[in-house]
Amino acid sequence: MAKEIERRFHLKDDSWRGLTEGEWLKQGYLSVERERTVRVRIKGEQAWLTLKSNISNVSRHEFEYPIPLADAETILAAMCPLLVEKKRYRILHGGHLWEVDEFFGLNEGLTLAEVELAGEDEAYARPDWLGDEVTEDPRYTNAYLSKHPWPSWGRD
Amino acid sequence: MAKEIERRFHLKDDSWRGLTEGEWLKQGYLSVERERTVRVRIKGEQAWLTLKSNISNVSRHEFEYPIPLADAETILAAMCPLLVEKKRYRILHGGHLWEVDEFFGLNEGLTLAEVELAGEDEAYARPDWLGDEVTEDPRYTNAYLSKHPWPSWGRD
C-alpha cells in the first residue's frame, strides 16, 4: 500500500526539452469513476495494473502490480475502449523528480508536468519551465483525459 | 489469458450438503459494468485481483493475478462499497467440477451451482440436486448481486 501526493502543472515554455530522453507509455482504463480508477499501462516490454483511490485531489491510495506484457496488450485491445498515449520525460530538479508528459493520439498538443511529494505541504523548487498549477482541476487527470480528450474541451 | 465458459443453476434441494467441506470467500468489485468487471477476492490467507470481460453470457475472457492479503483487505475496506460473502463447496460429479455457492451477508438465502466447461456446447452430467439453469439471467452474476442483493429482487 502506498499513499501518493502529486502536484500537476502546465508548462511555461519548451526549455525542458533536451534535458532528458523520453519514454513511450500506452495506457487504458478498465474503470474511471470519481472514487477510483483501474489502469493498465505498458512501458517498453513491461506492464502494470494499477488501482487508485481518489481521497482528495492531491492525496490518494495507490496499488500497483506487474502483469505479463501479453495480458496487458489483450486487456488494452479488448477491454479498454479509451487509450492514452504519451512520451514521459523524467527530470531531476532541486532534489525532486519531475515527470513531463507529452501527449499524443487523441490528446496531442497537451503537455503536463507532475511532481510526487511526501506530504501535501512539502516544499519544492520550481523549475524555470514550470507554468500554472492545475492540481485542483480534475480534467487534467489521465483518467478524465481518456474519456474527454483535451482538444475537445471548450477553450475559455 | 484464459477463456472461461460457465453455466449457472439453481439448486433443486439440499442433497448436495455434506458431500464436501466449504470454504469462505469474501469479494468486492472495483468496477461493475456490462462489458467488464474488476474483482478483489480473499480466500483464507490468499487474495486475487481478477478482470473479466463479458463477451456473451456464457463465454468471456478472464485475467487473474495474486496480490498481497494486506492489499486486498485495504482495497475491500477502502475502495469496494459493495461486498459479496459466500461459502463455496467444490463437488466433483461425472468428470466435472461443480461449485456450489451459499451466500451470506446481504445475499443470505441464495444458493447457486456453477460448472466450468471447455466450450459452449460441451456435454455434462446433471447432478440429482441440480435445479433450473439461470446462465442467461445476468442478475445471478456476483457482480450484479453485489449491487442488487437477491432479497431485494421482486419475486415473480
Image (cartoon, coloured by chain):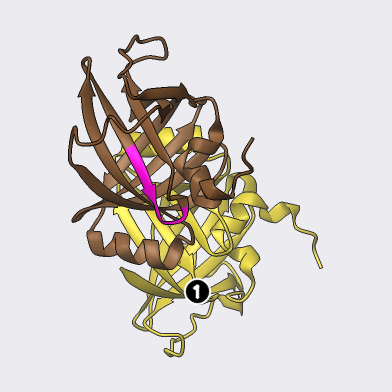
Chain colours: A yellow, B brown
Q: Quadrant of residue A115?
A: bottom left
The answer for which chain carries disc 1 is A
Identify the residue at horizontal 18%, vertical 36% (top origin): B20
Figure check: B74 above or below B20: below
**B134 vs A20, nearest the viewer:** B134
Q: Which residue is mark 1?
A: A55
Figure check: A36 above or below B131: below
Q: Secondary structure at mark 1?
A: loop
Residue B19, x across and y down, in percent: 19, 32
**A89 vs B52, nearest the viewer:** B52
Is most of the magenta stretch helix, strand or loop?
A: strand
Residue A129, x across and y down, in percent: 54, 75
Residue B68, x across and y down, in percent: 23, 58
Task: Examine the rendering and report whether any part of residue A29 can be seen.
Answer: no
Task: Examine the rendering and report whether any part of residue A25 can be seen.
Answer: yes
Q: Is residue B105 magenta?
A: yes
Using residue B129 as the reference point, say whether residue A127 is left or right of it: right
Quarter of the figure that contains the C terminus of chain B: top right
Quarter of the figure that contains the N terminus of chain B: top left
Figure check: A150 above or below B111: below
What span is in magenta?
Answer: B101-106
Using residue B112 as the reference point, say whether residue B34 is left or right of it: right
Q: Is residue B83 magenta?
A: no
Q: Amino acid at mark 1?
A: Ile
Figure check: A16 above or below A130: above
Identify the residue at horizontal 42%, vertical 24% (top origin): B131
**A1 vs B145, nearest the viewer:** B145
Residue A66, x across and y down, in percent: 29, 50
Identify the residue at horizontal 52%, vertical 46% (top origin): B150
